[in-house]
Image: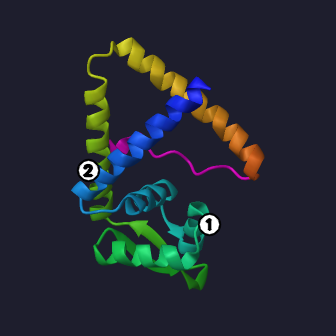
Amino acid sequence: MQVLDQLSLINRRSRTFVTVVAQTFGLQPTQVQLLVSIYRAGECRLASLAEQQLVDPSVISRQIGTLERDGLLARRPDPQDARAALISLTDEGRARLGQVRALHAERIAEAMQDWPLDRVSRLADDLELLADATERVDTQLTGSAPAPQASKELV
């Protein structure tokens, strides 16, 4: 199927690009993914984040520890359950994520610089429709809704 082939190609190129961009800002791609997830969630529990990322909490805990030591995340006790911690982005974490996303957006804009504005808008609309359709299928398949989309304020 042509759509699937093109989506796969874009996904591969995007992963490569995300790796290069992340490293430009001293991060690993998985760390960027965590920062985005925490940004979307606001403040969240480590266990919820591990569940969302489909990894063991010990894996997330190590990654969170590194990001916390780098000053990108803050951890505080959960007032509902003192045994748990809530994790959120620091101002520095928000700024670094904004830099990563801005560079990514800049590169996408550069790739599409010769496109007419109406074609860019049409593509954005079509991708939004595709995202909505795949969300419905994903929800049916998994029984749970995917994480909300990142706010546009980052870029």
Q: Is residue 23 above or below residue 114?
A: below
- For the point 34% across and 62% down, which residue is it? 28
Q: Main secondary structure of the magenta part?
A: loop
Position of the C terminus, as image quadrant, is: top left
Label 1 and label 2: CA atoms lie apart by 27 Å
Q: Is residue 27 left or right of residue 14?
A: left
Q: Is residue 36 magenta?
A: no
**In the rendering, which numbered label is found on residue 51?**
1
Q: Amino acid at mark 1?
A: Glu
**In the rendering, which numbered label is found on residue 112?**
none
- Mark 1 residue crowding within 10 angstroms, few (<14) / some (14–19) / many (20+): few
- Horizontal and vertical percent position of residue 95: 27, 56
- Horizontal and vertical percent position of residue 128: 54, 30
Q: Nearer the viewer, residue 114 or 132?
A: 114
Position of the N terminus, as image quadrant, is: top right
Q: Amino acid at mark 2?
A: Gln
Could one spot residue 85 in this view of the protein? no
Identify the secondary structure beneath mark 1. helix
Q: Which residues are magenta?
A: 144-155
**In the rendering, which numbered label is found on residue 99?**
2
